[in-house]
Amino acid sequence: MARFFGPRMAVIEGDVQTRRDTEQIEKAGCQAWQIETGGACHLDAHAVKHAMDHMELDSDDLRLLAIENVGNLICPSGYDLGENLRIGLLSVPEGDDKILKYPSPSLFSTINVLLINKMDLIPHLDFNVERAIEECRSLNPDVLVFTVSAKTGEGMEEFCDFVESNFS
Ligand SMILES: Nc1nc2c(ncn2[C@@H]2O[C@H](COP(=O)(O)OP(=O)(O)OP(=O)(O)O)[C@@H](O)[C@H]2O)c(=O)[nH]1
Ligand SMILES: [Mg+2]
């Protein structure tokens, strides 16, 4: 996402506790707001509105507001945050057999885009990318899939092109 870093992107981070992810985003030069849920396993639209009220979102440069929900595969899926696009992340160390363990209603059945991350670790694992994609499509036939590595940047150009062509 490096091409969005700076004033083009703002981020709302949802975690049970700590500002750690927000600090990382700020280091990358983006405006960020941390929601600490204090135990709740998902964000809701009220919490997002409250965060937006504290942020500066009027700039003409701003193109993308990203919301990172709490890392839970079930609870967030039932809540509409007003988003235009819902992206689910599966990282390869989680295993290619993960998706069908979380059938509908779950993250995988409600997303528009599946991002398979940490592709740099593929040589060390038995993760079958085709299997993961097939199983996700069995729950969610229209899902778009991108394979990426946040560490090496692999696949990020294609993903950013998609985001840019839809939302900038
Ligand atoms: N090897 C590798 N490590 C990665 C990659 N992306 C993230 N990580 C590491 O994986 C760990 C978790 O990444 P985060 O980005 O914090 O994950 P997260 O989704 O924000 O996690 P939560 O907010 O806790 O749900 C961190 O230590 C990252 O440095 C990647 O593409 N490759
Ligand atoms: Mg996070």
Image (tube, helix red, strand yellow):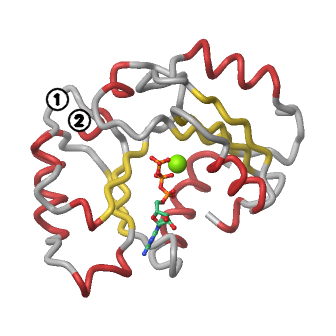
Residue ID at (38%, 71%): 118
Residue ID at (36%, 68%): 147
Q: Are marks 1 and 2 in contact (CB under 8 Å)?
A: yes
Q: Is residue 72 left or right of residue 1?
A: left
Labelled disc at residue 120:
none
Q: Residues within 10 Å of mark 2 (few under 14, many from 20)?
A: many
Q: Position of residue 81 (x, y in %)?
A: 52, 22
In depth, the one of 102 and 163 nearer the eye is 102
The disc labelled 1 sits on which kind of residue?
Ser
Q: Earlier in the sequence, mark 1 or mark 2?
A: 1
In depth, the one of 126 and 132 nearer the eye is 126
Residue ID at (74%, 42%): 32
| Residue 24 to residue 77: above or below | below
Q: Position of residue 111 (x, y in %)?
A: 34, 39
Q: Quadrant of residue 17?
A: top right
| Residue 134 to residue 85: above or below | below
Residue annotated with mark 1:
104
Residue ID at (61%, 18%): 47
Q: Position of residue 113 (x, y in %)?
A: 37, 48
Say which element carries label 1: loop
Quadrant containing the N terminus in the rendered view:
bottom right
Residue annotated with mark 2:
109
